[in-house]
Image (cartoon, helix red, strand yellow):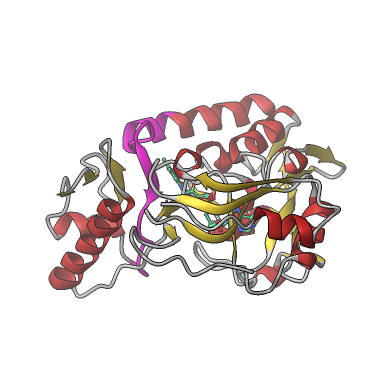
């Protein structure tokens, strides 16, 4: 499946753009599940100024979707109409600041933030050791583990809105709740400033090793997966509801509910996005039938199904 090429239209509208534009770029290899169709256009901005310029000059009828490291994402088989933005090198600095603070670009993998904090004797960020996404995804998802989440460590986040304005959001402005950020979806985060505490590097390293061991023992982290598929409903565990509904090991096409952790879905090899999404919807239905609880997707699904008519044509 290919989309009409938007690149010439974008180049004409943005003569000073410095970042890369690629038409019909496959997205599957940019996600953990390794499924899905292409982006109509993939844009990789050089830096925050370039991103702001792009957004200020983008024709309003072209949709924008941002992706991070693709660890919480199903890209549907028909691909993503419009522009998909992925931040790279210009957003990958990590700097330690006075007062046990750490500043990280949105493209920095969470694990690098955990390591940089450990090396600088900053405690409070070790939980990022086990989350395979990047800081942009952590800001959007309020990513967390082992009793801490992004909102507990964040001072402020920078981002670029749909009009191309660079904005700074305080922790309170982000209106965080469990795996949810209250800032409008059009904001693309570019940087985070974290507050840590004084810590002992050896003790932090030991904490991180424990996290690694516990992950390897309880989660299929070497599989093609998207992590926890559904949010835990208030006072309940999604995996227990899924298990009680008899879904552990359930297969649709080449996708399976993990035997090891049944809130994880796995691409067994050759799965389509439709296999994975249908499996997830089957689980939701069975859980509703057995327990009355409606599970809510934690994994984000973007794009259109195979065979759907692409909507974003321009010019
Ligand atoms: C094996 C495994 C274990 C996991 N364990 C955990 C865990 O313990 N805790 C946890 O919270 N999550 C976990 N996850 C899920 C995932 O790692 C997190 O949700 C992570 O924060 C997603 O980051 P990402 O960069 O991969 O974002 P993506 O998956 O690429 O995107 C996720 C969402 O974030 C948005 N987004 C990405 N970048 C930006 C940006 N710069 N600005 C605005 N929005 C953006 C996307 O539009 C999308 O809506 C796990 C996943 C896997 C595969």
Q: Residue at x 52, y 52 (%)?
A: 39
The image position of residue 256, as x and y in percent, is: 22, 45
The image position of residue 16, as x and y in percent, is: 86, 53
Residues 54 and 90: in front is 54
Q: Is residue 262 magenta?
A: no
Give the residues drawn in magenta, as a range. Answer: 213-235
Q: Is residue 146 left or right of residue 244?
A: right
Q: Compared with residue 178, is residue 219 higher up or lower down, i.e. above or below?
A: above
Q: Is residue 161 left or right of residue 82?
A: right
The image position of residue 14, as x and y in percent, is: 80, 58
Can residue 199 be seen in the rendering of this structure?
Answer: no
Q: Is residue 234 magenta?
A: yes
Q: Is residue 199 left or right of residue 14?
A: left
**Quadrant of residue 206 within the rendered picture:** top right
Which residue is most to the top?
A: 202
Q: Residue at x 36, y 43 (%)?
A: 225
Residues 32 and 55: in front is 55
Q: Is residue 232 left or right of residue 147?
A: left
**Quadrant of residue 168 within the rendered picture:** bottom right
Residues 183 and 224: in front is 224
Q: Residue at x 38, y 35 (%)?
A: 221
């Amino acid at each position: 499946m290919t989309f009409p090429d938007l690149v010439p239209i974008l180049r004409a509208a943005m003569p000073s753009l410095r970042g890369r534009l690629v038409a019909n770029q496959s997205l599957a290899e940019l996600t953990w599940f390794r499924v899905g169709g292409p982006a109509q256009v993939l844009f990789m901005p050089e830096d925050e100024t370039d991103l702001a310029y792009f957004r200020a000059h983008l024709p309003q009828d072209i949709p924008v979707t941002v992706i991070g490291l693709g660890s919480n994402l199903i890209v549907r088989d028909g691909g993503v109409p419009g522009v998909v933005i992925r931040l790279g090198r210009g957003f990958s600095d990590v700097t330690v600041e006075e007062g046990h603070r750490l500043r990280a670009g949105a493209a920095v993998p969470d694990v690098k933030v955990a390591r940089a904090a450990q090396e600088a004797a900053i405690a409070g960020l070790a939980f990022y050791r086990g989350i395979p996404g990047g800081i942009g995804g952590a800001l959007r998802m309020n990513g967390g583990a082992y009793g801490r989440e992004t909102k507990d460590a964040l001072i402020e986040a920078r981002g670029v809105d749909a009009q191309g304005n660079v904005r700074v959001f305080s922790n309170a402005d982000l209106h965080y709740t469990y795996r949810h950020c209250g800032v409008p979806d059009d904001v693309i985060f570019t940087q985070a400033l974290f507050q840590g505490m004084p810590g002992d590097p050896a003790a932090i390293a030991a904490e991180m090793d424990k996290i690694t061991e516990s992950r390897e023992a309880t989660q299929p982290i070497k599989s093609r997966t998207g992590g926890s598929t559904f949010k835990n409903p208030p006072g309940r565990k999604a995996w227990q509801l899924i298990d009680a509904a008899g879904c552990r090991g359930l297969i649709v096409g080449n996708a399976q509910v993990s035997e090891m952790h049944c809130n994880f879905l796995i691409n067994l090899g050759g799965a389509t996005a439709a296999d994975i999404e249908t499996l997830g919807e089957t689980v939701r239905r069975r859980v509703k039938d057995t327990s009355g609880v409606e599970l809510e997707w934690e994994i984000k699904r973007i794009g259109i199904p195979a065979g759907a008519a692409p909507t974003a044509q321009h010019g």
